[in-house]
Image (cartoon, rainbow, N blue to C red):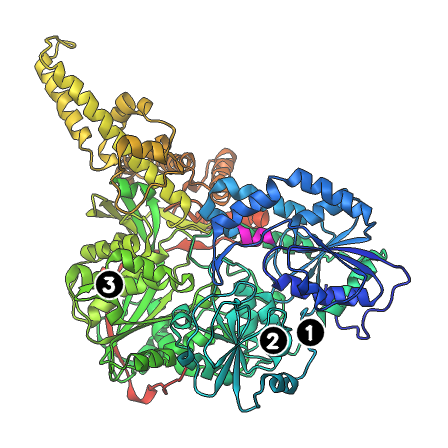
Amino acid sequence: MGIADGGGGVSASREHLVFAYYVTGHGFGHATRVVEVVWHLIAAGHDVHVVTGAPDSVFTSNIQSPNLYLRKVLLDCGAVQADALTVDRLASLEKYHQTAVVPRASILAAEVEWLKSIKADLVVSDVVPVACRAAVDAGIRSVCVTNFSWDFIYAEYVMAAGHHHRSIVWQIAEDYSHCEFLLRLPGYCPMPAFRDVIDVPLVVRSLRRSRSEVRKELGIGDDVKVVIYNFGGQPAGWKLKQEWLPAGWLCLVCGASDKQELPPNYVKLAKDAYTPDYIAASDCMLGKIGYGTVSESLAYNLPFIFVRRDYFNEEPFLRNMLEYYQGGVEMIRRDLLTGSWTPYLERALTLKPCYEADINGGEVVARILQDTANGKHYVSNKLSGARRLRDAIVLGYQLQRAPGRDIGVPDWYSLAENEIGLRAASPMTETNDENFLVESCFEDFDILHGELHGLPDTMAFLKSLSGLDSITDSKNPEKRQMRERNAAAALFDWEEDIYVARAPGRLDVMGGIADYSGSLVLQMPIREACHVAVQKNHPSKQKLWKHAQARQQAKAHGAIPVLQIVSFGSELSNRAPTFDMDLTDLMDGERPMSYENACKFFSQDPSQKWAAYVAGTVLVLMTELGVRFGQSISILVSSAVPEGKGVSSSASIEVATMSAVAAAHGLKIDPRDLALLCQKVENHIVGAPCGVMDQMTSACGEANKLLAMVCQPAEVKELVAIPTHIRFWGLDSGIRHSVGGTDYGSVRIGAFMGRRMIKSEATSLLSNSLANVNVSHNVDGMNSDDYEEHGIELLKAEASLDYLCNLSTHRYEALYAKRLPECINGETFLKKYDDHNDTVTVIDPNCTYGVKASTKHPIYENFRVEAFKSLLTAAKTDEQLSSLGELMYQCHYSYNECGLGSDGTDRLVNLVQEMQHRKSSHDGSTSLFGAKITGGGSGGSVCVIGRNCIQSSEEILEIQQRYKSATGYLPFIFEGSSMGAGKFGYLKIRRRPSSAVAPTNI
C-alpha cells in the first residue's frame, strides 16, 4: 500500500507519546534521515529517545529540544569499510558476530528493561534487527523505516565467509519478522522478512538557506561551477590535486580530516556543515551511491557523478532509480583516483534530473508513526505473502552469489513494482520471422566471409548491430539500456570491416567437476550462445569515448592504441556496461604484464572485473603467442547464455572473444588450442579455478553431439552422436552458481590434497614393498616374482599420479580410502605435505577442507562417465535409459557429499524422481529417467535425461510449474543444441553505405 502527501504537517496528538528510535551503526546516512523524522515527531509534542552510535552533533545541531534524548549504544555495525569504496565482507560479518551475536542475550535483556523504563509507546528501527525482537519481548509494537535490510546486504557476504556465518542472515531476518510493518523508502531492495509494507516518499533533509545565500558565504558568484565531493561519513583520504578540476571550477569537500591539505580550488566544509544546503548550491555532486546522496541529489535536481562500490547490495537499486530520473553519470574508479574528472563534469552539466515525486517523507513517516503509537492498525497488504515469497527467492540468489560478480538479482524480479521503471528487455531484436531476419542481415551488411549457418540468434545479433542508430533520449522503460547501446553505436567505424564470432554455452551431461582431476567428460553445446563483434582501427582513426580522449590528452604521447569494450545486458546486474584501457597498459616494459599483475589490475574495481574475461584474451594472446597489437581494438559482447546458471557463460564469452580477435588479426588458432588459451584467461586473469571442459565444449562442440573428452589436459576422444530416442534438458534452479565461489574452490583443493596424500601413501607402500621384494612365497599358485613385479609397478604409477582419475575405483578402495581423513586443516596439511601441487588454487592455513569426499568423487565419476558413454550405444531399451538415469542420480548425490549441492537443485532432481516413479507405477510409461546437478554445483542447473517424445516435454513443463509453485521461481529450460565456435568460424561483415550509423557522442 502507498501513502500519498496529506499536507499540513503532523498534527499534535492528544496523547503525549514516547518513541524509541534505533539507528544502525552503518555510517551517518541513516542518522541524517532519522533526524528529519525525529524533528517532525518532536514538533508534534512527543518525546523521542534515539539509540545510536553516531556523534551527538548529528542530532543536536539540527534539533534543540528537551524532548530529544540520546542514548549512545551500538547494537549493530553495518558494513565495515576499508575505505570509501571498499567493503570488507569478512570483517563485516565478524564484527556483527562480536557486536550483536555473542552478547545477544544480554542485549535483549538490557533493551527490554530500558524500553519498559522509558514507557515507550512505539519502537522504530532504521534498521537495527535486534530492536524488533526486543520490542516484542517488551510487549511493544515496532515499525521499521528503511530502503534495505541487513539480511539482504549480508546475504552476499556469506559466500566469502563460508557456511558458518549463514546463521547470521537467518537470525537477522527472524528479528525483522517481529516488526509490525515496514515503511519502505524509494529505491528499495527486496526485503522478504517484513510482513506488511507501506511505501512512503523520499525522506530528505529540508533546506535552510537558498543557493544564493550559500554562494555568498563562499564568496562565489553564479558563474562559478561547483562540484561537491561527498563520500559520506567515510572520508576518502585521497590526495586531491588542483589540475583535476577544469578552470573556473570549485570543489566543496565533505568529510575531510583536519590534517588534510587542499589545493586553492578546493574548499573544506566544516564537520558540522549542513550538507543539503551546499548540495543545492552546487552544480553537480561527485561521490558514492548511498540513500542520502541519491535522495538529496534527486530532491534538489542535482546531477550526480557516482563511483560504484563493491559488495554493497543496496547500490544497484538506488543507481537504477538515479539513472531512471536522468540524474546519474558513472565515473570509472580508475579515473576518480587519477584525476580524469573533466569529461564527467562536462557530461553532468548536460543532464536535466526530473524527479517529480514527493520529497516530504519525513513528515509522512512521522504521521504514520504517531498514528500507530496511538493504536491505529494499518490494513495488511493482500499481496504481501506473494511479495515476501518473491523477495525470499531473491535472497536465496544472494546466498549463492559469486564474489566480485553481478548483484545476483534474477531477471524476473520486476523493478516495475516501484517508481524506478520497468526492467529492460533484451538488447537483441527478437522476432519469429526468420526470413525477415535473413533479409535484414543482407540488406544492412555485406558478408565478406563466413556464413550464418541458419542460426536465428546470429541473424538477430546482426540485426541488433544495424539498429544501434535507433536510440533516442526520451524517458522510457529501456532507459537503463541506453548507455550501453549509445556506447556501442560509438564503438565502430561503420565504413570498416567488423569480425563476428559465436560460441555457445554448454550443458554438463556427465563429468562436471571431475574435469580438473583428469576425468572423461560428456558435454553438450547448448542453443544459447555469446556473440562478439571486433574491429581494429589505426589509433588516429579510432573513435574514443570522452574520458578516454581526456586520458590520452593528459599523457601527451599522441594517438595510443586503445581497447574499448561494451557489454550488452550489463545494466541488469551490478557492473559497468563499458570498459576501456590503453593497450600499452598491458605491457610491462618490453614484455606483457604478468598474469598475477593482470588479475590484480582487473580486480581493483569489482564493477569492471567482468572485463577480465574479454580483455584477458588479448593479454593471453600477447603472452602465449607473442602477438603485439599496434592498432586499437573495439569489442562488443552480447551473450544470451545466462550467468550463474551453471552453463558456462564465462567460457562462451572467452571463446567468442578470442575467436573474433584472432579473426580480426589474421591468427589461425586450432579450436583445441584456443580453448586451452581461454582456460588460462579464466584461471590466471579472472582467478577462477575451473577445468578446461567448458572452453573445449564451446570451441570444439558440434550440434546434437556430446563432446567426449579426457581432461589430461584436453584430449577429445570423439563426438558422440546423441541417439535419436534420447533427449537432454537443462533446468535452472534459480540459485546462482559460480566456479569462483568458496565451495567449488574448497572442493578442488580437497581433491588435490587427496591426490597428494595418495601419492605419499603409495610412496610409503612402495618403499615397504621394495624392502621385501626378495621374500619368496606363492600367492594362489601365481609366481611370486610376477606378483611382486605387478604390484610394484602399480605402486610406482600411483606414487607419481598425475590425475586422480587414473586411479581405479578398486585400487582406491583397497589401499587408500581408509587412509584418507574426512577433512584436514590447511595449516596441518601444509606442515606435513608442503603443497597440494595445484597452480590455480591456494590453501588457506586457517580453513578446513573436506578431503575424502572430494577425492572419491572424481575417481568414481570417471568410472560412471565411461559406463554412461558405453551405454549410449547400447540397445534402445528401457533398461538402457534407466541405467543412464541411475548413473546421473549417483553423480548428483556424490556432488552433495562433496558439499556442492543446493536446495534448489535437490528439489528439481526430486521432482524428476517423483515424476519418473509416479508414471512408472501408474502405467509403466515413464519418459524421464534421471537428473543431476551440473558444472561446479552449489546451485545452477540440473541436466535431465529422457525419451525424445512429446510426453517427456510435457513432463518437463509440469516439473517447471511445480517448481514455481513451491518456490515462486519459474526455471529456465535449456533445450536444443548448436555448433561450437570452431564449426561456426567467423563472419567478416561491412555495413552498406546507405545504412551507415551517424556517430554518437557519449
Q: Where in the figure is residue 744, as x and y percent of width and height?
A: 38, 44
Q: Identify residue for label 2.
A: 298
The numbered dot on residue 983 is: none
Does 423 appear above or below 467? above
Disc 2 residue type (three-letter): Leu
Q: Dot 3: few (<14), some (14–19), or many (≥20) neighbours within 10 Å?
A: many
Q: Which residue lies furthest to the right in this view?
A: 14
Seen from the viewer's position, the closer of residues 876 and 222 is: 222
Tell me the residue at 35%/59% (across/down).
527
Q: Upstream in the sequence, badge 2 or badge 3?
A: 2
Q: Identify residue for label 3.
A: 619
Asked whether the residues under the numbered discs 2 and 1 touch, taking CB atoms below 8 Å apart as contact, a structural biologist would say yes
**Secondary structure of residue under mark 2:** helix
Tell me the residue at 22%/66% (across/down).
587
Asked whether the residues under the numbered discs 3 and 1 touch, taking CB atoms below 8 Å apart as contact, a structural biologist would say no
Q: How far apart are marks 2 and 1 (CA)?
A: 9 Å
Does 161 appear above or below 292? above
Q: Where in the figure is residue 413, as x and y percent of width and height?
A: 55, 60
Asked whether the residues under the numbered discs 2 and 3 touch, taking CB atoms below 8 Å apart as contact, a structural biologist would say no
Chain part drawn in magenta: 150-154
Decide if residue 905 is in sight here.
Answer: yes
Check if residue 435 falls in the magenta segment. Answer: no
Disc 3 residue type (three-letter): Leu
Q: Identify residue for label 1.
A: 359
Q: Dot 2: few (<14), some (14–19), or many (≥20) neighbours within 10 Å?
A: many
